[in-house]
Image (tube, coloured by chain):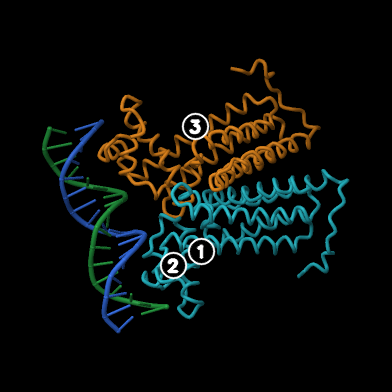
Chain colours: A cyan, B orange, C blue, D green
Amino acid sequence: MLYDEAMASTRDRIIVATNEMFRRHGYNGTSLSQISAASGATIGSIYHFFPGGKEALAVSVIETTAGVYRELFDSIAAEADDPPLAFADFFAGAAAVLEESDYIDPCPIGGIAREVASTSEPLRNAAAQAFLSWIAAARKHLVDAGVPPPAAGELATVFVAMVEGAFVLSRTQRSDEVLIAAGKQMAELARQAVVSHPNLPPVSRPSRAGSTR
Amino acid sequence: MLYDEAMASTRDRIIVATNEMFRRHGYNGTSLSQISAASGATIGSIYHFFPGGKEALAVSVIETTAGVYRELFDSIAAEADDPPLAFADFFAGAAAVLEESDYIDPCPIGGIAREVASTSEPLRNAAAQAFLSWIAAARKHLVDAGVPPPAAGELATVFVAMVEGAFVLSRTQRSDEVLIAAGKQMAELARQAVVSHPNLPPVSRPSRAGSTR
DNA sequence: GTCTATAATTTGATAGAC
DNA sequence: GTCTATCAAATTATAGAC
């Protein structure tokens, strides 16, 4: 098993182990017996916590992962020296994680969605909500930086698409080259969106020193 | 079955049917019995043409699809009124296909790679080669348009990542919104890459009127 | 080249003791 | 809450007749 039985609750161990299995082998490529072995929980326990079976477990994995990545983005955005550079920082962080993990998929959500979007409406919907929450976070960051809302929404959407696409390529090529390039180009797009509307005064923002929160 | 037995060779029918099944249900979500039913070929026939089984069949599907998309890009690039707009045209075409197909995955390659990159080196490698061939095509288009090679390579990589990412999001959201946005932003990046080096004379190109070929 | 039959394994899911 | 035992069905792959 991957985790010590002293660690966290059984339910959490199941979710964490399933997350990693999905990132390695996808949704259909991961069996409940594998999840059982990786989490140290029996199949009976899995059904105890997730009566809806594999599909319900996957929904929980998606929701959990969506929250983690959203918080990660917010944290990086808050600490960025310069708003457009937050995107480069985000991709750089993903690149570091990717190498450490021997090029496992950095995120299970896009892969699951691709596999089952035509057969599982609950899973497709959970993935769609995850992407929308990321788009909302990126959009807020851009609007705070002075990008007009319509352009900010479009750019935020493209950002999430670039994240997913760079994940696909980096995993396939076993290289973080595309992640770095994507961060650079996304920052460039963000900078253009800000400077191309210099007559719009930046929205009142707390000074960086006071916005640690 | 999806295809009339009068159509094409058995081998081609197997590849076309498998391509569509993979786009609907992914690699692990598609069984040989389903491929048999969809292609009108028996499982015995499938093993006759692809002695390597499902994996060898998938390699052929990836190689075939890679060639089709590469030719599509080259064709769109050759006909574009303005080089940067070729990218917007490409995404617009993908958007049209997506809606017609009820939001099936527009391409099986990225999904397969994500599922099996950790378990099948032949499939990971086939997908990696496909992406590299697309990057090379986009890079050539950008260099021909006057973008310096280093920047062109980076932009071409980001283009392919945006394609894959936009496919993931559009399929998940059941909307072509992200495809349109991606085309617009990619064209913007390409335009910036050209105009940001105005001192470089554009490479000699045949006039559009004579380049119909 | 195509077909049927089948081997060997694994799957998701359930029942019920403890 | 956790466990073992087990179900019916589906999976990849192979063998061998035609």
Above-or-below relation of B198 to A32: above
Mark 2 lies on residue:
A50
Q: Which of marks 3 and 1 is in front?
A: 1
Mark 3 or 2: in front is: 2
* Mark 1 residue element: helix
Q: Nearer the viewer, residue A14 or B44?
A: A14
In the picture, the disc for residue B68 is 3
Q: Residue at x 66, y 43 (%)?
A: B154
Residue that label 1 marks: A60
Q: In this view, does A44 lie above or below B5?
A: below
Residue B208: percent from left, percent from top: 68, 19
**Residue A209 falls left or right of residue A139:** right
Q: Is mark 2 on a helix, strand or loop?
A: loop
Labels 3 and 1 positioned on one and the same chain: no
Is there any visible trace of residue A181 in the rendered image? no
Disc tally is 3
Tell me which amino acid carries mark 1: Ser
Query: What amino acid is labelled 3 in the image?
Result: Val
**Residue shown at 59% from the left, 40% from the top:** B176
Residue nearest the observer in this picture, B141 or B1: B1
Q: What element carries label 3?
A: helix
Q: Kindly indicate whether the residues beneath marks 1 and 2 are on one polypeptide chain.
A: yes
Q: Which chain carries label 1?
A: A
x 46%, y 75%: residue: A10
